[in-house]
Amino acid sequence: MTLADLAPGDSAKLEQIDTRDPGVIKLMILGMVEDITVKMENIAIGGDPLEVGFFGSSVSLRKEQARHFKVSRIVPDPSI
């Protein structure tokens, strides 16, 4: 599963990053690195761009860039 597969409100852990896209390197400089938790904040009408939150900030990225981030969805605990 990639970051592009998440729905608004979903949280996930970044597991693996494909760094072949220079835009992905720029996102990593902003803090999108392996082992952090991200939240899909919003998806624009038409599906592109995506707004992803992490560390109290949000960034917008294209769906094509989001496909370079492998994630595992975090399932919320229903007892909370």
Image (cartoon, rainbow, N blue to C red):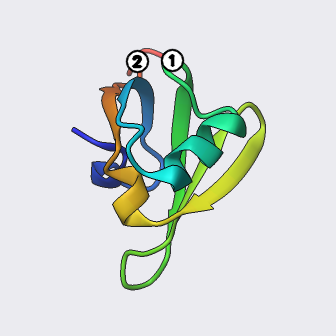
Q: Nearer the viewer, residue 22 or 70?
A: 22
Say which of marks 1 and 2 sits in front. Answer: 2
Q: Amino acid at mark 2?
A: Asp
Say above or below: 65 vs 49: above
* Residue that protrudes farthest toward the bottom in the picture: 46
Counting from the top left corner in percent of width and height, residue 22 is at: 51, 52
Residue 46: numbered disc: none
In this rendering, the answer to whether 52 lies above or below 43 is above
Q: Residue drawn at (74%, 31%), measured in percent from left and top?
A: 55
Helix, strand or loop for disc 2 = loop
Compared with 74, 32 (above or below) is below
Can you give x and y, in whole percent of width and height, for residue 17 in the image?
Answer: 39, 31
Mark 2 and mark 1 in contact (Cβ < 8 Å)? yes
Residue in front for this viewpoint, 43 or 60: 60
Question: What secondary structure is marked by label 1?
Answer: loop
Rendered image: mark on residue 80? 1
Label 1 CA crowd tier, 10 Å (few <14, some 14–19, many 20+): few
Looking at the rendered image, the quarter that the N terminus falls into is top left
Residue under the point 38% across and 21% down? 78
The alpha-carbon separation of the residues under discs 1 and 2 comes to 6 Å
Where residue 70 sits, quadrant-wise, is top left
Mark 2, Cα crowd under 10 Å, few <14 / some 14-19 / many 20+, is: few
Q: Depth check: give the residue in front, 56 or 23.
A: 23
Residue bearing mark 2: 77
- Name the residue nearer the viewer: 61 or 10: 61
* Total labels drawn: 2
Residue 41, given in percent of the width and then of the height, sits at 57, 54
Residue type, label 1: Ile
The residue sitting at 78% across, 37% down in the picture is 56
The x and y percentages for residue 18 are 35, 36
